[in-house]
Image (cartoon, rainbow, N blue to C red):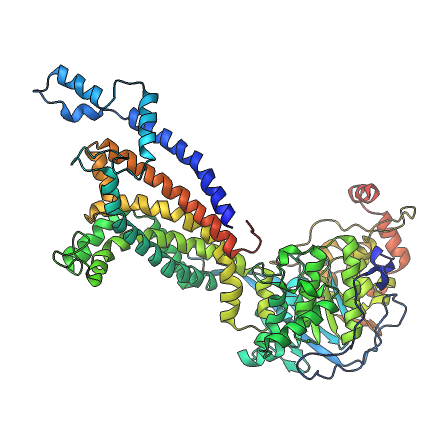
């Protein structure tokens, strides 16, 4: 298992290199240039030339890429990811500062998803074609179809403005630093907005996966052995139905990060997602590059996690 | 007619251990297994069981319909698939009742309803004179110790996330054998009994071959020390060479433990090899039920006759005309009136299409001692008639038969 993880991590390196190439190209292809923000009527062409040379924009693209990537991997140096155009702070520090907030948001959303979606999906499968099942399936379709920015705005409006039950923005009230209850209170709406779509998708997968397993002969024989229903459903059916759901877990992690971009912006939540949207808006190139790479790493890690979990839960898979 | 299975003796099973103590060495005092009614040996030389043998399982007018729902909200009932439509028979203690018929005739559904793995639409099943439908959870749990099942697909019927020990030992565990050491001892004994290496107890199902997996399924069924086992096509998914091993294992276990089988299979050679009595199903009904020798020698339902003529002949030099049925099995949603077989019946054609075939549904009636058939015209079946029916088939059917 350990050697498998090492091997997979090594295999991830060329993938991440490919991601870096593509990310760098996209930024190159995007209209505009890093020095556009200095273009004011009062700047002279000579000063612009100096800036171009300062940022190395006069050099061939390949050289620029090599320079960027060699610096980028030296994460032990504070300036490895460059300095933000926005405030001149090291990007690495800014990212690290915001990681806990986003991890908290994503973790809470993922936990909520698993805790709610698995029982909902199982319920729908066990009561297939009943009113319960139809209600769940319909709600899941609606939940899956609502765009998260609409959902977030509604949640904010009803939960924060109409009911005044939840805060309108931020991660923490002023002067309540370290107060866990306050943190959770601030998390409720953003987590709901992130998780509802996930729950809808997971519940539908869970339902079909469970249905497939319920029709297997080993579930019938379990029943024929005289096992209590809870044991037939739990030990025999659910355990096997969870195996394909692991794939979903691997896919959900990057999806949550992408969703966090919208959610955090709507709820003014100080995480990586809001930072990403902001950096794109103001063309903060070093931050955009860094955060896109972080996203790429998340995809690779999510997939690795799913593959490792397969080995843990499925005895047919050995690494 | 001898299928390849019939020629195999138990010596072909290299890994069958000698059984130390036959009977019921389980953790519970064994129920009285009763006397063996005259069980045929593997050679098929002995006679059929005594018609007066004790009835272990009684199926009375069993019906299973699967509703077809449709409409805008999916709640209006459009009709029903009449998978099992009024089936009655007895299974006697110690015998093997074979159940044959085409795909989709309702054999498997019947087996599942008898075990209460599917809820019945109507009718009754009793085991040891005890009706099982309507039993509450705990009483049903007790009944489940008496009746077990072996399914067709050895890959789908074992939980891939459980070891062999867990699979076989789980039944005893939920039925009160809490002691782990004793349970493992029991599992090892069962593995030995079905011819598996006892040291494989901690392996997972995927580490075994198809035949071995089916042996695990048999060990699991035996773990509760049942009287009655429904074998639902237990060898159909296996290699022919493995089929005979598993059949012989089932045969040996029956003799050793006094088991009673309901053996569902579409392969009539297999059914003949293992059964004492055979029932033939067509569109949810039993059309003929007879002692095995009688049925294979002197079938009294035109459908049975046609089925038997389709069994492959192992001797390639013996050419034989086959009675090929035309058309498909009619839909079980809307079965034909009168006799369900009349749309494809060669006998009806030969007799000049008598009207009662279309208007009256034939009852399963006794033709001779130990033989029942559901045909108005059973007595009209003669060897010459079968011969001429086979010869006077339309060109298409003949061409098909000749191509084989």
> Which residue ends up furthest to the right in the rendered image?
B317
Asked whether, in this view, residue B104 is left or right of residue A90, the answer is right
Residue B265 is drawn in which quadrant? bottom right
* A34 shown above or below B91: above
Residue A292 is drawn in which quadrant? top left
Asked whether, in this view, residue A82 is left or right of residue B36, the answer is left
Of residues A173 and B24, the one drawn nearer to the viewer in this rendering: A173
> Which residue ends up furthest to the top in the rendered image?
A46
* Rendered location of residue A77, percent (x, y): 28, 37
* A234 shown above or below A206: below
Asked whether, in this view, residue A64 is left or right of residue B333, the answer is left
* Rendered location of residue A98, percent (x, y): 24, 46
Number of dots carrying numbers: 0
* Rendered location of residue B287, percent (x, y): 74, 65
Residue A6 showing in the rendered view? yes
Q: Residue at x 69, y 78 (%)?
A: B26
Of residues A72 and B91, the one drawn nearer to the viewer in this rendering: A72
* B148 shown above or below A151: below
Residue B377 showing in the rendered view? no
Q: Residue at x 55, y 80 (%)?
A: B138
Of residues A192 and B191, the one drawn nearer to the viewer in this rendering: B191
């Amino acid at each position: 298992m350990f050697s498998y993880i090492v091997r997979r991590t090594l295999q991830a390196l060329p993938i991440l290199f490919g991601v870096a190439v593509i990310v760098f190209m996209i930024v190159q292809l995007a209209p505009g240039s890093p020095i556009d923000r200095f273009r004011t009527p009062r700047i002279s062409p000579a000063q612009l030339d100096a800036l171009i040379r300062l940022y190395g924009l006069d050099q061939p693209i390949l050289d620029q890429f090599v320079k960027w990537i060699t610096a980028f991997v030296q994460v032990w140096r504070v300036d490895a990811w460059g300095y933000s155009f926005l405030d001149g702070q090291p990007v690495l520090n800014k990212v690290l500062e915001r990681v806990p907030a986003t991890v908290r948001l994503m973790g809470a959303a993922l936990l909520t998803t698993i805790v709610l979606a698995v029982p909902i999906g199982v319920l729908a499968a066990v009561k297939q074609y009943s009113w319960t099942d139809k209600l769940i399936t319909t709600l899941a379709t609606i939940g899956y179809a609502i765009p998260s920015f609409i959902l977030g705005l509604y949640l904010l409006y009803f939960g924060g403005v109409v009911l005044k039950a939840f805060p309108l923005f931020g991660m923490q009230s002023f002067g309540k630093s370290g107060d866990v209850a306050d943190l959770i209170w601030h998390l409720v709406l953003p987590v709901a907005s992130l998780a509802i779509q996930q729950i809808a998708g997971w519940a539908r997968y869970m339902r079909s996966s469970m249905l497939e397993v319920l029709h297997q002969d080993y579930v019938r024989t379990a029943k024929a052995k005289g096992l209590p229903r809870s044991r037939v459903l739990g030990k025999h059916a659910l355990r096997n139905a969870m195996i394909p759901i692991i794939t979903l877990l691997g896919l959900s992690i990057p999806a949550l990060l992408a969703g966090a971009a919208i959610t955090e912006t709507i709820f003014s939540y100080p995480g990586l997602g809001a930072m990403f949207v902001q950096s794109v808006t103001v063309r903060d190139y070093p931050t955009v590059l860094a955060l896109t790479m972080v996203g790429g790493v998340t995809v690779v890690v999510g997939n690795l996690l799913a593959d490792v979990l397969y080995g843990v839960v499925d005895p047919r898979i050995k690494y | 007619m001898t299928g390849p299975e019939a020629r195999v003796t138990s010596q072909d099973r290299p890994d069958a251990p000698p059984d130390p103590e036959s009977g019921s060495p389980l953790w519970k005092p064994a129920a009285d297994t009763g006397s063996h009614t005259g069980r045929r040996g593997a050679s098929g030389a002995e006679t059929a069981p005594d018609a007066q043998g004790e009835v272990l399982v009684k199926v009375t007018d069993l019906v299973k319909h699967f509703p077809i729902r449709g409409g805008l909200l999916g709640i209006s009932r459009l009709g029903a698939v009449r998978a099992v439509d009024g089936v009655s028979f007895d299974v006697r203690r110690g015998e093997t009742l074979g159940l044959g018929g085409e795909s989709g005739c309702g054999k498997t559904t019947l087996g599942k309803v008898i075990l209460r793995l599917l809820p019945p639409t109507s009718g009754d099943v009793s085991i040891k004179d005890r009706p099982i439908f309507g039993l509450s959870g705990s009483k049903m749990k007790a009944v489940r110790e008496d009746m077990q099942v072996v399914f067709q697909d050895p890959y789908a019927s074992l939980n891939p996330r459980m070891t062999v020990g867990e699979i076989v030992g789980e039944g005893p565990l939920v039925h009160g054998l809490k002691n782990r050491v004793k349970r493992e001892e029991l599992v090892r004994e069962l593995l030995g009994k079905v011819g598996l290496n006892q040291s494989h107890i901690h392996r997972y199902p995927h580490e075994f071959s198809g035949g071995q997996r089916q042996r695990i399924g048999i060990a699991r069924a035996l773990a509760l020390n049942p009287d009655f086992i429904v074998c639902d096509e237990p060898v159909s998914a296996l290699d022919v060479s493995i089929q005979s091993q598993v059949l012989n294992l089932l045969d040996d276990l029956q003799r050793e433990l006094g088991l009673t089988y309901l053996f569902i299979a579409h392969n009539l050679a297999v059914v003949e090899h293992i059964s004492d009595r055979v029932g033939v199903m067509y569109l949810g009904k039993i059309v003929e039920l007879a002692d095995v020798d009688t049925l294979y020698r002197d079938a009294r339902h035109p459908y049975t006759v046609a089925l038997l003529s389709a069994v492959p002949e192992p001797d390639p030099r013996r050419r034989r005309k086959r009675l090929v049925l035309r058309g498909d099995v009619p839909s079980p949603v809307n079965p034909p009136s009168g006799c369900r077989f009349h749309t494809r019946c060669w006998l009806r054609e030969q007799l000049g299409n008598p009207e009662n075939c279309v208007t009256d549904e034939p009852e399963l009636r006794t033709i001779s001692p130990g033989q029942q058939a559901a045909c108005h015209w059973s007595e009209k079946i003669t060897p010459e008639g079968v011969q001429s029916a086979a010869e006077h088939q339309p060109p298409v059917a003949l061409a098909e038969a000749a191509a084989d």
